[in-house]
Image: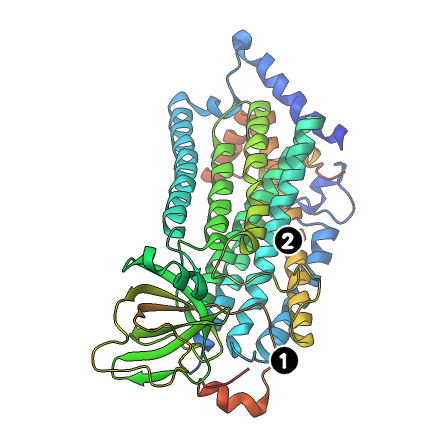
C-alpha cells in the first residue's frame, strides 16, 4: 500500500506550476525590458 | 509612491491630447479597430464565463449540500421522514464491528451514542477502519439486515428493524496529526487499529 | 538573448534605477536575495517534507501532501489579501501603482488557489476516497474564489481607459475577496468533509506532531519567499506593460516589427 504516487504527483504539480510561472515571469521581463527605454523603468522607487 | 503613479497617468493624458480630435480612444484600441473589437469581445466573454461559472458552482454546491451530512443520531431521529430517500450519514466506525461478507462490508457507525447498522456494497477507501469518522451515502432499508447476512458484531445498541444501505464511503479524517508509532504500525496497516 | 548589442549592460546607466537593477530584465538585488532564499528554503522543505518528517498515525505517508497543500491555500489568502489592499488603496489614492500591485498579486493568487485545489484533489482521492465533492463547502467556496479572480483577471484585460479599468477591477476585487472569510470559516459554519483548521484552530492549540508542525511552518515561509519573488518580478512586468501601453504604442509596434525582422534597431 504505497501512496508515493499521489505524493509525487502532488509535489510535482507544485514544483511544475511554480517553476513554469517563474520561467515565464523572467522571460516576459526580459522581452519587455528590451522594448521599454531605460528612463521609463522606475518601478519601486 | 504617489509620485510614482504620475508618469503613467500623465502619459495617458498626453496620448489623449495627442490624438487627433482629442477623442477618448483607449491606447490599446489604437492597434486597429478590428483587433480592439475582437479583444474586447473575447475578454468580456471570458469575464462573463468566469462569473457564470461561479453561479454554476454555487448552484451545484447548494443542490448537493441538501444531501449532506446527517449525524447518526439525527438520522435516527428523522428516520420516518427520511423513508428510503438518499442522504449522507456521518458517524464513527464502531470498534470491532467491521466484518466482510462477500461483496458486503458490514459495520456500525455511531454518533452521540446512537448506532446505525450499515451494509456497504463495494470496497471501502484505504483509510477506512474502526474508530475513523466516515460519511456514507445511501438510504435506510426497512429490514433488520440484508438478505442472507446478519450484523453479528454489533453490540445491540442499534435501533432494530432497519439498517443503512450504503454504496459510497468517504473517510473524514480529522485535523489532528500524530507521529506514527512503530508499535502500532502493523495494526494500522491491518486497518484494525484502535485509538 | 540576441539583443545584447542593442541593449548593452550600460544602457540603463542614466536611468533612475536602483543599484543592482539589471536593465535587461526585471531582476534586482531584491529578487536575487529572495530568489536565493527561496531556493535554499525549497531544499529544506523537500528534505523535511519528503524525508525527515514522520508518517501520520492514520494517514501514513499521505500527510506529506499537507506541506504543499496548506501553504498553497495560505498563500492564496495572502495574495488576495494584498489584492484587496491594493484595490482599496487605489480607490483611495487613485494611484496606478496600487492598481498594479493588486493586479500582480491577483495573478499569483490564482496560481496558488489553483495549486491548492489540485493538491487537495490529489490528497482527497486516497484519504477521503474522492477527488471532489460538490457538497463540501470548503471545496466549493475555494473553487468560487478561483473563478472570481479568474474573472477579475479577464475584466482587467477588457480594453478600457486606464482609470476606468483600474476602478472597475478594484470593485470586482473587493467583491471577490468577500469569499475569503467564507472559505476560511466554511469548515466551521457548515458540515464539511474537509477537516477544520489545525494550526489556526480556534483554541490555538494545534494538535499536531512537533516536527510536522515545523515542516508545515517551513513550507509556509518558503511559499511566502517565493510569493515575494514572484511579486517583485510580476509587478515590474506589469509596470513595463503599462509603459508600453501608455507612452507610445507606435514605438512599441515599431520595436516589435524591428525585432521580428531581426534588425534589432530600437531606440
The C terminus of chain B: image quadrant: bottom right
The chain holding disc 1 is C
Task: Please report the residue visible at 52 percent of the width from the left and 33 percent of the height from the top.
Answer: C156
* The furthest residue to the left: B147
Q: Name the residue under label 2.
A: C227
C8 over B191 or under it: above or below: above
Give the number of callouts: 2
* The furthest residue to the right: C19
Is B132 or C248 nearer to us in this picture?
B132
The image shows residue B158 at horizontal and vertical percentages of 39, 75
Task: Please report the residue visible at 42 percent of the width from the left and 39 percent of the height from the top.
Answer: B50
Is C87 or B183 nearer to us in this picture?
B183
Disc 2: CA contacts within 10 A as few (<14), some (14-19) or many (>=20): many
Q: Which mark is residue C37?
A: none
Task: Please report the residue visible at 68 percent of the width from the left and 57 percent of the height from the top.
Answer: C225
Q: Mark 1 points at which residue?
A: C52
Amino acid at each position: 500500500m504505497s501512496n508515493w504516487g499521489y505524493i509525487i504527483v502532488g509535489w510535482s504539480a507544485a514544483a511544475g506550476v511554480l517553476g513554469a510561472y517563474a520561467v515565464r515571469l523572467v522571460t516576459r521581463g526580459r522581452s519587455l525590458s528590451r522594448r521599454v527605454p531605460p528612463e521609463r523603468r522606475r518601478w519601486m522607487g | 509612491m504617489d509620485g510614482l503613479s504620475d508618469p503613467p497617468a500623465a502619459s495617458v493624458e498626453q496620448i489623449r491630447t495627442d490624438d487627433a480630435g482629442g477623442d477618448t480612444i483607449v491606447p490599446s484600441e489604437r492597434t486597429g479597430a478590428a483587433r480592439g473589437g475582437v479583444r474586447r469581445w473575447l475578454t468580456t466573454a471570458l469575464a462573463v464565463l468566469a462569473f457564470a461559472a461561479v453561479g454554476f458552482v454555487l448552484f451545484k454546491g447548494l443542490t448537493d449540500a441538501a444531501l449532506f451530512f446527517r449525524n447518526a443520531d439525527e438520522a435516527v431521529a428523522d428516520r420516518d421522514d427520511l423513508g428510503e430517500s438518499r442522504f449522507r450519514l456521518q458517524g464513527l466506525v464502531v470498534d470491532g464491528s467491521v466484518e466482510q461478507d462477500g461483496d458486503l462490508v458490514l459495520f456500525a457507525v455511531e454518533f452521540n451514542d446512537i448506532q446505525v447498522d450499515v451494509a456497504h456494497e463495494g470496497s471501502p477507501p484505504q483509510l477506512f477502519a474502526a474508530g475513523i469518522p466516515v460519511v456514507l451515502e445511501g438510504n435506510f432499508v426497512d429490514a433488520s439486515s440484508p438478505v442472507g447476512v446478519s450484523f453479528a458484531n454489533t453490540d445491540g445498541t442499534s435501533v432494530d428493524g432497519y439498517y443503512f444501505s450504503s454504496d459510497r464511503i468517504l473517510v473524514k479524517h480529522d485535523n489532528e496529526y500524530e507521529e506514527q508509532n512503530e508499535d502500532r504500525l502493523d495494526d494500522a496497516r491491518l486497518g484494525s487499529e484502535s485509538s | 538573448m540576441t539583443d545584447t548589442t542593442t541593449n548593452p549592460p550600460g544602457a540603463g546607466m542614466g536611468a533612475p534605477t536602483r543599484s543592482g537593477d539589471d536593465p535587461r530584465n526585471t531582476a534586482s538585488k531584491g529578487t536575487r536575495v529572495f530568489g536565493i532564499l527561496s531556493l535554499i528554503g525549497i531544499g529544506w522543505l523537500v528534505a523535511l517534507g519528503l524525508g525527515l518528517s514522520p508518517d501520520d498515525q492514520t494517514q501514513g505517508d499521505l500527510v506529506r501532501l499537507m506541506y504543499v497543500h496548506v501553504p498553497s491555500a495560505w498563500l492564496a489568502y495572502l495574495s488576495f489579501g494584498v489584492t484587496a489592499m491594493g484595490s482599496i488603496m487605489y480607490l483611495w489614492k487613485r494611484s496606478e501603482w496600487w492598481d498594479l500591485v493588486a493586479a500582480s498579486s491577483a495573478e499569483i493568487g490564482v496560481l496558488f488557489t489553483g495549486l491548492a485545489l489540485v493538491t487537495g484533489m490529489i490528497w482527497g482521492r486516497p484519504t477521503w476516497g474522492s477527488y471532489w465533492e460538490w457538497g463540501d463547502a470548503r471545496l466549493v467556496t475555494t473553487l468560487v474564489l478561483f473563478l472570481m479572480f479568474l474573472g477579475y483577471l479577464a475584466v482587467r484585460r477588457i480594453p478600457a481607459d486606464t482609470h476606468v479599468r483600474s476602478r472597475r477591477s478594484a470593485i470586482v476585487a473587493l467583491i471577490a475577496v468577500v469569499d475569503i472569510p467564507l472559505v476560511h470559516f466554511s469548515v466551521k459554519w457548515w458540515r464539511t468533509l474537509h477537516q477544520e483548521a489545525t494550526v489556526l484552530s480556534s483554541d490555538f492549540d494545534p494538535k499536531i506532531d512537533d516536527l510536522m508542525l515545523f515542516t508545515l511552518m517551513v513550507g509556509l515561509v518558503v511559499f511566502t519567499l517565493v510569493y515575494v519573488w514572484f511579486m517583485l518580478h510580476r509587478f515590474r512586468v506589469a509596470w513595463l506593460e503599462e509603459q508600453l501601453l501608455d507612452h507610445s504604442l507606435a514605438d512599441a509596434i515599431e520595436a516589435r516589427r524591428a525585432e521580428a525582422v531581426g534588425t534589432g534597431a530600437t531606440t
